[in-house]
């Protein structure tokens, strides 16, 4: 049975992991530094570079039996250059290790390959992606009132990943403060129109 962690629990998993490596306060940690520190703490852990043609069905792969992250050469070199996608791929596979996922897990190269994942595998892939984003941009290091584009630049993430991460951080902070999620502007407009027509509207519209 897969383990279902709340957002807060997964945030703590990521922060605890970075704390153990001495990276809790570091913005934009280098993936190779993270790998080196994991190896120092856990001699079983290893990584391997594989030619792209030898790994046609995945960009990278976690193998719990070998305690190893294998990655395409193009992902390794991209990671070294600081490319957002390559960084995310590597942190995704590291997240499988951190979460104790068993078996072989792929960061698939194509949507078609990913579609074969079902049940536990699908859940663990999603969980690894969530944790990868947390490791890249821990909530306690995310500045207030910054845009997703600011976060992408600050933490070396893709804009897509930064948008999702900002939504997650905003939701966690709203819950912590006991705040409700702001209404979309389209909903506000409907309520304003209803109010203008005399309907009793209790919702605060901030205007």
Image (cartoon, grey):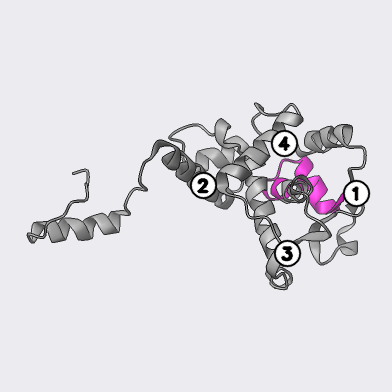
At a point 43% along the width and 42% down the height, the residue shown is: 175
Q: Which residue is mark 1?
A: 48
Q: Position of residue 88 (x, y in %)?
A: 69, 48
Q: Nearer the viewer, mark 2 or mark 3?
A: 3
Q: Nearer the viewer, mark 2 or mark 1?
A: 2
Given residues 53 and 14, the one toward you in this image is 14
**Quadrant in the rendering for residue 8:** top right
- N-terminal of the pair, mark 2 or mark 1, is 1
Magenta stretch contains residue 82: yes
Is disc 4 in contact with disc 2, using a CB cutoff of under 8 Å?
Answer: no
Q: How many marks?
A: 4
As measured in the structure, the alpha-carbon distance from the residue carrying label 3 to the one carrying label 4 is 22 Å
- Badge number at residue 121: 3
As measured in the structure, the alpha-carbon distance from the residue carrying label 4 to the one carrying label 2 is 19 Å
Please state, as top left, top right, bottom left or bottom right, where the N terminus lies in the image: bottom right
Q: Is residue 10 left or right of residue 42?
A: left
Please report the bounds of the magenta region as a residue range.
67-88
Q: Which residue is mark 4?
A: 17
Disc 2 packing (10 Å; few <14; some 14–19; many ≥20) = some
Q: Is residue 91 left or right of residue 56?
A: left
- Badge number at residue 90: none
């Amino acid at each position: 049975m897969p383990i279902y962690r709340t957002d807060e629990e997964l945030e703590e998993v990521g922060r605890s992991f970075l704390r153990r490596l001495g990276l809790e306060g570091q913005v934009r940690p280098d993936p190779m530094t993270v790998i080196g520190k994991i190896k120092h703490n856990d001699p079983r852990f290893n990584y391997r570079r594989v030619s792209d043609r030898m790994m046609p069905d995945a960009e990278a792969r976690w193998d719990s039996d070998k305690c190893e992250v294998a990655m395409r050469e193009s992902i390794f070199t991209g990671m070294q250059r600081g490319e957002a996608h390559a960084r995310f791929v590597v942190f995704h596979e590291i997240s499988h290790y951190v979460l104790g996922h068993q078996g072989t897990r792929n960061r698939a190269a194509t949507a078609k390959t990913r579609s074969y994942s079902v049940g536990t595998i699908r859940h663990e892939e999603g969980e690894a992606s969530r944790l990868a984003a947390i490791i890249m941009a821990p909530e306690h290091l995310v500045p207030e009132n910054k845009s997703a584009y600011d976060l992408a630049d600050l933490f070396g993430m893709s804009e897509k990943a930064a948008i999702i991460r900002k939504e997650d951080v905003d939701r966690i902070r709203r819950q912590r403060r006991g705040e409700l999620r702001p209404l979309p502007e389209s909903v506000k407009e409907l309520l304003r129109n209803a109010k203008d027509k005399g309907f009793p509207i209790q919702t605060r519209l901030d205007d």
